[in-house]
Amino acid sequence: MKKHKLTNVLNHLMKFLTFITIIIFLISFTSCQTKPIKTIFQTVETDTATKLNETKKYILKKQTENSDFNYSKLTDIDGNIQDTLNVKNLMPIFEPVCGQYNYYQFISTYVGQAYNFDEPPLFKDFHDILIIKTDDKNKIIDAYQYTLEWSESPLQYDVFVSSAKNIILTNDMNIAELKFKRTYSWSDDNKELKESGIIKLQ
């Protein structure tokens, strides 16, 4: 009887050890498949704003490999704002996460007209962020744009996603080629981004 119990205990122990071994193997295999994000280029240099009605320039601020978009944040920007609504709290939404693509982040600094109630026109600097992910041949897989000073609720209304297919990211390309559309809208009107601007890779 004791021998039978001992055999059962040993069998359960072997099954448990086998299970643990498989789990460790799977964790090791997965971690080997996920390469860390590699930064190719990054700058915090401040750009001079383009003048009112001048063609906007999207200047490269960050380029990484082994990256992807954080879609859970991009598709729910209102639910992912921490504390105060400001650029510092908005930027993590557009930062890359681990993945298998190339990531590009651009900022366009420009003078625009701000809403000023019934007061005289108010002009100030605005910043549009543009993020693009590509494959190894620089074919654009996805792209998003957002105005960092946007403050009307819901914030998601100003998040645009590219609807373009099979285009290559090149220097001096116009963002109009990305065919941006709102990710959230109250109606079928005013869904498309009607602005233009030049992408600067260098």
Image (spheres, rainbow, N blue to C red):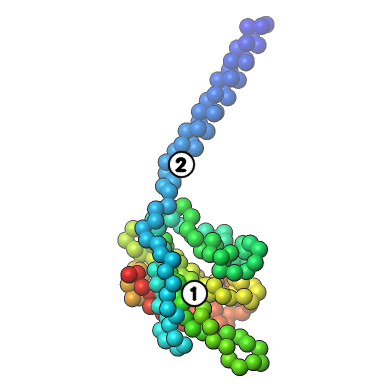
Pointer 1 residue: 128
Amino acid carrying mark 2 in the image: Ser
Pointer 2 residue: 31
In the rendered view of the protein, which quadrant contains the C terminus?
bottom left
Q: Residue at x 51, y 80 (%)?
A: 125
State the image coordinates of residue 46 (x, y, percent, origin top left): 44, 72
Q: Under tag 1, what secondary structure?
A: strand
- Quarter of image, res 11: top right
Q: Under tag 2, what secondary structure?
A: helix
Classify mark 1: residues with Cα within 10 Å, few (<14), some (14-19) or many (20+). Answer: some
The relative height of residue 198 versus residue 9 in the rendered view (above or below) is below
The span from disc 1 to disc 2 (Cα, nearest Å) is 35 Å
Amino acid carrying mark 1 in the image: Asp
State the image coordinates of residue 171 (x, y, percent, origin top left): 32, 72
The relative height of residue 58 versus residue 117 in the rendered view (above or below) is above
Q: Nearer the viewer, mark 1 or mark 2?
A: 1
Q: Residue at x 61, y 86 (%)?
A: 115
Q: Residue at x 47, y 33 (%)?
A: 25
Image-based side of 15 in relation to 44, left or right? right
Q: Is residue 147 visible?
A: yes
Q: Is residue 79 visible?
A: no
